[in-house]
Image: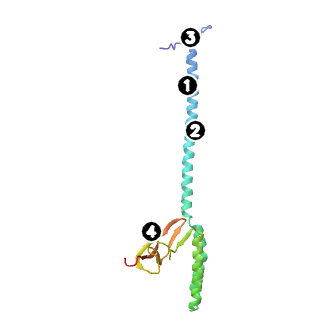
Amino acid sequence: MENTDPIQTHDGSESASPDTDELGKLVNEYETKLGEMRDLLLRERAEIENQRKRLQRDLEQARKFANERLLGDLLPVCDGLERGIATATGDVKSLREGMDLTLKALLKVAENNGLTPVDPLGQAFDPELHQAVGMVEAPQAAPNTVVSVMQKGYVLNDRLLRPALVMVAKTPGA
């Protein structure tokens, strides 16, 4: 056990032992460092929480306005359709031409946003891109070839959005 009794100095006054003074200084130093570390930890936690909230807010904004560019590109297509509907003439030919132009504009917008049509007529059947509705005898086509497309399929940025609905040639007599 360590002696913690005061020590008599030359002039008769009492003083704490040198070890006690050093320990007191160390304790004070460590308490100061501990306080600094606590402050740093609290600041870091607050910064992480603020960053999390900022990321959450940015993510919500990104979700909210993700389609902004696409919808902005679709507005001229809608305008063209509205003009076509407002036309008072009953000319079927001009109406058809207007619809054709509008469809081309719509497909261009879709293409610019990563949409690619799947029109497999005459190609080998691919179950990754096509959905067979039925099989028919088609002597002019090789077996397992798409002979008619009932509905085009679409790929969005290399991922299948909708498979093409197709009729497939079967082996004659099968």
Q: Residues within 10 Å of mark 2 (few under 14, many from 20)?
A: few
- Position of residue 11 measured from the top left corner of the image (x, y, whole percent): 62, 8
Instruction: Residue at 55%, 29% (x, y): give it.
Output: 31
33 versus 162 height, above or below: above
Residue extending farthest bottom: 90
Give the amino acid at mark 4: Pro
42 versus 165 height, above or below: above
Colour option used: rainbow
Give the amino acid at mark 2: Leu
Q: Residues within 10 Å of mark 1 (few under 14, many from 20)?
A: few
Dividing the picture into quarters, in which one does residue 34 lie?
top right
Is 99 on the left or on the right of 127, as rendered? Answer: right
In the picture, the disc for residue 27 is 1
In the picture, the disc for residue 127 is 4
Nearest to viewer (mark 4 / mark 1): 4
Say which label, 2 or 3, has the lower sequence index. 3
- Would residue 149 be seen by someone viewing this image from the given angle? no
Report how far apart the C-alphas of labels 4 and 2 lie in the structure: 59 Å
Nearest to viewer (mark 2 / mark 3): 2
Q: Residues within 10 Å of mark 4 (few under 14, many from 20)?
A: few
In the picture, the disc for residue 40 is 2
Say which label, 3 or 4, has the lower sequence index. 3
Secondary structure of residue under mark 2: helix
Say which label, 1 or 2, has the lower sequence index. 1
Secondary structure of residue under mark 1: helix
Give the amino acid at mark 1: Val
Q: Are dots 3 and 4 in contact, CB under 8 Å?
A: no
Instruction: Residue at 55%, 70% (x, y): give it.
Output: 116
- Position of residue 157 measured from the top left corner of the image (x, y, whole percent): 55, 65
In the picture, the disc for residue 7 is 3
